[in-house]
Amino acid sequence: MLNSLVAESVDPEPVRLRPVDAHADGEHAARFQAVLAGELERAYRLATVILGDESEGQDAVHDAAETAWRRRGELRDQERAAAWFRQILINVCRDRLRRRRRWRLLEVLRAPFTHEHPTVADTSAAFAARDQLQRAFERLSPHERVTVVLRYEEDLTVPAIAELLDIAQGTAKSRLHYALAKLRAALEEGHE
Amino acid sequence: MNDTIDDSSLDEAIRGLLAGRRPRGGAPAELHASIVLITASSHGGTVTRRVIPAIAWMLGLAAVAGALALVVVYGLSATGLVPGASPVPSGPSPTFDPTVTGPGIVGYPSDTLHTVPWLLGGVAAVTLSAIALGSRHIRRRLISASAAVAILVVSFMFSTQPGVSYANAYGGVVAIVMVEPPPGSDGRPVGYVSAKPGDPYAIVFNVTNDGAMPVRVLGLVQSPPDAAPRAMAWAALWMVSGVNGGVPGPEQSAQFEPFDLNPGDFVVLYLVGRAGPCAIGHPFDPDTDQLTGTSRDRVQLAYSTFGLTAVSNVPLPMVVVEPELDNCSA
């Protein structure tokens, strides 16, 4: 739970926190913090899945929060605050993916726990297929990667994806189609 | 083997892939805290954990780039590699004249070559090391740490430049009588000054650049800071450049002007002195003359590398001795 806490130190590694009067934050700050409080865990998970790295996910969420706070005047409908923040977060993640260099090492595959995915057999063939799938996923364009994550991690429908990304439904459908085609080809290659 | 993956298998595989990319725990406490900082108005504005390291990163890089640019530009201009400057003597030069006083004699320069690189390198290395230690990104750490090491290595190279060294040829030219090394000496021959008081004498030897960087030879330092009051004084310096060992005659020399000496190149120097007021004024005769006087067994050549000055203590290939009259009160 987020209380009205302010760090004494602005060091990257926060040292101590002390309580302050909540009234000092202001109405805007309180509303902003409330929105973020509800979205933070989901945003952190989403950013980490898109970027494939926890520290990058952390940075992306922080960058998105900064951007959202800076542009808070653009938000007209407070009811859409959460979706608006998620849009900003996705844009931040896409920017990071574009800047990322090709020589970035692929992460070691994290084998899914049995309780997460009990039907996956831990065989070398399955591992090879997963490896191919992972590589294909890393090679997707930022747009394609985000679309796949929104579809399979957030379980959004194509219309919901299109609304979130502020694109046409046809565009969302097309991106998803091409992304899945690449992933399917990689998986088939892994099973050969 | 399946050649075609059905939709449900693909779905399953993708979900498994994405499940593997989820974070191992919830959002870390520092992320919560940093989000709060974004709206912390009681501290006078938005201060984030990314702004300060970014500013430090930019300031550090700007300081390093600025310092290096300053050294390089100053050095390029000092070595004549910018338009309008000439690193070698231009125009006709008078022929060797030992009675001319002044050319090539300079004062003792500041030893910036052995201090400034370490100062700049130290500041840059500390800044980059702080950035490397404070960054969470491995690539930024590697770049900063590598840059810090590289700067320290460059500073070390600059400060350990040998400058100008004696090469392999020498001799007396004017009013110098060369004798073999006396018994008990360090093995160097002796050149006795035979000039009358106030008259010129001259020796010659060649020098080279043993370092890896070109140096600009600025001149002969008149006398070391700790010289005795009646120490021998040099009057002028003449030079012959573009030689590869050996000693061309003084008639081929030119008045000294600062010039660039590349690694491995040679230059012949004619050192002209003036006999002091107590000089005996004739060739020294060990059978009749008492050996009292002054001597010089080394000279100091001022030089610069990329505009940073230093002094090379160059041992002379011979000991120059100026015998003096007994009981001279001048």
Image: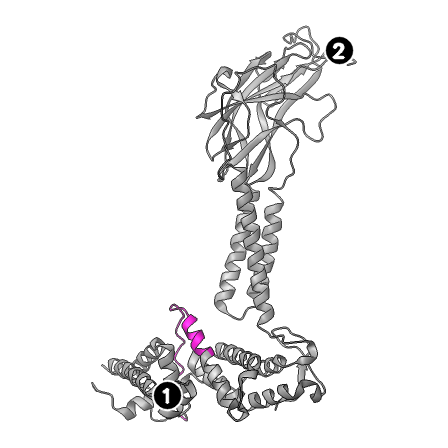
The answer to whether residue A160 is seen in the rendering is yes
In the displayed structure image, the side of residue A62 where residue B222 appears, left or right: right
- The 10 Å Cα crowd at callout 2, few under 14, some 14 to 19, many 20 or more, is some
The answer to whether residue A117 is seen in the rendering is no
Task: Find disc 2 in the rendering and name its residue.
Answer: B326
Mark 1 or mark 2: which comes first in sequence?
Answer: 1
Task: Find disc 1 in the rendering and name its residue.
Answer: B16
Q: Nearer the viewer, residue B43 or B296?
A: B43
Residue A58 in the image, given as x and y percentages of width and height = 52, 79
Marks 1, 2 in one chain: yes
Q: Which residue is most to the top?
A: B288
Report if the CB atoms under discs 1 and 2 are less than 8 Å apart.
no
Q: Which chain does the residue under circle 2 lie in?
A: B
- Determine the CA span between mark 1 and mark 2: 104 Å
Q: Nearer the viewer, residue A90 or B3?
A: A90
The stretch of residues the image draws in magenta is: A92-115
